[in-house]
Image (cartoon, rainbow, N blue to C red):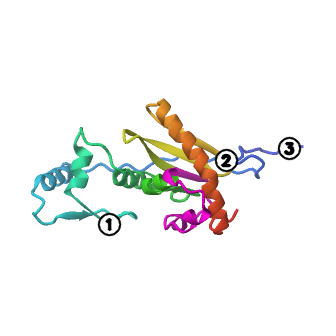
Amino acid sequence: MKKRKRYRSKYHCSPYVEPIVSIQPPIFYPTNDHIASLKAWIEEDDTVEPKTVVLNLPSFDEVDRDFFRELVEPDESLWSYHMDALSYLLLKDCVSDKPYKLISPYFAHQVMNKDSKDENVWTAHRCLPSVDWRGLEKVFAPLNVDGMHWVLAEVDLHTKLVHVYDYMRTSRSMLHAVHLCVRLPLLFQCIQATQIFLR
């Protein structure tokens, strides 16, 4: 009798599926002319046209020179809009066909700083309906720790686990992750109450 070929399961107790193919993110190398043109534009006075450039991102369409000045200066910190843009561009082509969602740093900040346990505070917030939670398996959230550095939280909606990726591995960032874990159940309760999260 021929033995049945077994595949690694994507989920525990799910039907056998083909193993997940490793992601090969696309690589874009700007030309020297592109870099020189951007540097020249950044160094110009803010009154010189064009004052903004188009990025075509979900969070914002146009950015000014300060966006890039803060990005390239070694002593400047990355702001939430930088992380929003970078995270979106990194995940856009890598997981666009996967049931994953990257929430913006602003949304993550709201999740971390809601003081009220009143459900209406969450359901009335405009960020909550902006995410389609149906069919999602994982949610990624960039989090800022004490204004010092960024970590990435990965929320697995099937296993109910939160993984935090932090290159510094500080005790403060761990406390931040614990705070996120405490806040998430309330968030998901409100999602279910508003029938946005339909599982």
- Compute the Cα span from label 3 to label 2: 38 Å
Give the amino acid at mark 2: Lys
Q: Which mark is residue 61?
A: 1
Whether residue 39 sits left or right of residue 70 in the image: it is left
Q: Nearer the viewer, mark 1 or mark 2?
A: 2
Q: Is residue 93 shown to the viewer in this render?
A: no
Q: Secondary structure at mark 1?
A: loop
- Compute the Cα span from label 3 to label 1: 58 Å
Q: Residue 38 lies in what quarter of the image?
A: bottom left
Q: Residues within 10 Å of mark 3 (few under 14, many from 20)?
A: few
Residue at the disc numbered 3: 2
Q: Could you say where residue 50 lies in the image, as x and y percent from the top left?
A: 15, 66
Q: Residue 84 lies in what quarter of the image?
A: bottom left
| Label pair 1/2, CB-CB below 8 angstroms | no
In terms of depth relative to the viewer, which is nearer, 123 or 133? Answer: 123
Residue 116 on the magenta span: yes
